Each structure stands twice: as C-alpha cells, then as structure tokens.
Amino acid sequence: MDYLNIQTYEELLVREGFHPDLDFYPKGERRFGDVLGPYRFVKKILCGISSCHTPHLHGYLITTSDGFETAIGGDCGARHFGVRFTKERRRVESAMRRDQRIKAIQNLILTLPDMITTIRQLENDYRTLQDLKMRLMGATTPNFVKQLKERAERDGATITRSEPMTKDEAAAYFATSNKQNRTKQDWPQKEVFVAKLDGLSFFKVQFKDLLVTNLLEPLNRLSQTRAEEIEEMGPKELARTAKWVGNVPREIANAQSAIDAGKRFFAADNISKLVHLGADNSALAPMILDLRGQSDSSIRPVVA
C-alpha cells in the first residue's frame, strides 16, 4: 500500500517523529517531504505548520526534509508548499482510488454464486411472463400487444372513454372558450376514467439488455478472472470494471422491478381490463380463468 490508513488523531500522536507544530521555510530551513496518507476526523485539529494553525477536519500526514512528520490541511498544503504538495496528494489519492476499486471488484466476486442464482431466477420468471405475453398475443392480436407497448412507452396506463359533457359542464366550457354551441355534433366531450392497468411498464423493458448484456455475460466473465489479473488491470480498465460493479445492485433491482410489474400485469383482474381497449372478452376468458386458478407461488419472488 502506497499510503497510510489513518483513523484517529491519537494514531498520529504516538508515531515516532510526529510533531503537531513545526516551523517551515522561510521561518526555518525545513521543507515539505512527502504525503503519507489522508485523514478525516470528527473533531477539528490545528494545522501543523506553525505559521498557519488553521483548524480542519480533513488533511494529510506529511514528512519533512529533516525526517519529522506533521498533520496539515489540504488547502494549507497547497498554499504553503505549492505544486509539489499537490502532485503528492494526487498520487496518494490515485493509489487510494485504485485500492478501493480493486476491493469493490474482489468483494463482488465473493458474492458471485448467490448473485448468479438470483439472476437465473429472474431469468426463469421472465420466461414464464414471456409465455403469458405470447398467450395474450394469441388471445388478441400482435398489433394489440404492440399498442400495449406503445402505451407503456408513453406511461398510458389509465384507460378513459369520451362522453358528452353535462349541460352545466358544457356551459362552463363555453364560458371559458371561444367556441359556441352550434349543433349536437359540436357538443363538447370529456374524458371519463374507466380503469388503470397495473404493471404496464413490463412491456417497455428490454430484458435481453437488462439481464443478459448488462448482468449475466459480464458476471460470467468476471467469475473467470483471477485475483492477480484484477490487480494487474490498467487504470482505464479498472475504472470501467469498478463502475460496472457499482451499478450491479441497481441493475438487479431494475430487473426485479420489471418482473414485479409483469406479475401485476398478468393477474386475472388486470387482464380482464383489456376489454376496455377492444380485446374480445370471450377470447380472454380461458386465460383469465387459468390465471385465477394459479397459486401466488407460480412465479416465485426473488430474494436478492
């Protein structure tokens, strides 16, 4: 490790060579040496540069040209020691980010068996829902299912119908518009709530991308990666892999959310609402009957 992991100020006080207050050039000949590590404390401490003493929570343990150590704030270091301090600080911070990324990837590898089991269960659930989608297509038409997808894309879960306004509603409408009541054909219409489809968002999810491209394939590749290969990764590859690792829990949650939406959509009461969109009730009836007969555990929930 190219830096120290510092947790408390007391750790610094017992270090040989540490001094909480030191003179630096131009007050003396002493100059900045290296950055040993960063710290972040819960209580403020004073900067170790005698001419500064700025209270701070976040700073750096540094060495000096004559072999001593002290603690300084980040702004203090840049102000008093300039570019050399800034380069040293960046070197240490870069080493820390690298270690954090390696650790994040290694920690994910430890959980891979359970994680892949979870994703496989999601995949099985999706196949079950996809079979129901194909059955719905058979009970309606491919174009009907396409229209459901279009509704999902525009978040159109609410089903309404148009009906004529009452006389009072029409009077209020004409009072606030430039239109005049001429004929019955011109009588204003209003949208009336009929039903709301649950889980419609299931139809706009690209499951191949969500499960296979974004999760299964990268996880399978990572499962074949040796520990030393992770530590040998270049900065760009390591950063890219660590970023993907950080997104894995969210991707799994997105997949689970999509599966949950599919379960809600393919519930008997929900499918029966499709008659309001023009589906034939007699064609839907066998599917609705089967859905009513299914137990709640037919599509098992996933425990991540």
Image (cartoon, helix red, strand yellow):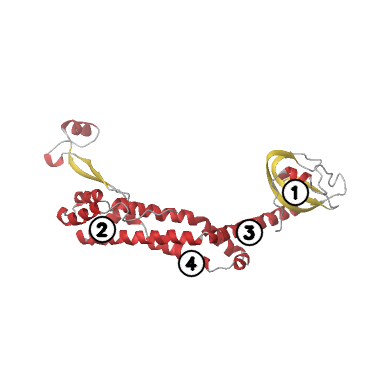
Would you name the residue on which mark 2 appears? 145
In-front residue for pair 189/248: 248
Q: Residue at x 20, y 49 (%)?
A: 276
Q: In 3D space, how far apart are the residues under numbered discs 2 and 1 (Cα atoms)?
A: 64 Å
Q: Which residue bears the numbered disc 1? A: 61
Q: Label 4 vs label 1: CA separation?
A: 42 Å
- Name the amino acid, label 1: Leu
* Label located before the other in sequence (2 or 4): 2
- Identify the element where label 4 is drawn: helix
> Label 2 crowding class (10 Å Cα cut-off): few <14, some 14-19, many 20+?
some
Inter-mark Cα distance, 3 to 4 = 23 Å
Position of residue 126 measured from the top left corner of the image (x, y, whole percent): 35, 59
Q: Can residue 246 be seen in this view?
A: yes
Q: What residue type is labelled 4?
A: Asn
First reached walking from the N terminus: tag 2 or tag 1: 1
Identify the residue under disc 3.
98
Q: Characterize the local packing of mark 1: few (<14), some (14-19) or many (20 or more) Cα atoms within 10 angstroms.
A: many
For mark 4, what is the residue? 220
Identify which amino acid the numbered label 3 is placed on. Arg
Q: Is residue 50 above or below residue 218?
A: above
Q: What element carries label 1?
A: strand
The reply to whether residue 140 is visible in this rendering is no
Quarter the C terminus occupies = bottom left
Across and down, in percent, residue 240 comes to 55, 61
Tag 4 near tag 1, CB within 8 Å: no
In the picture, measured across the screen, residue 128 lies left or right of residue 24, that is: left
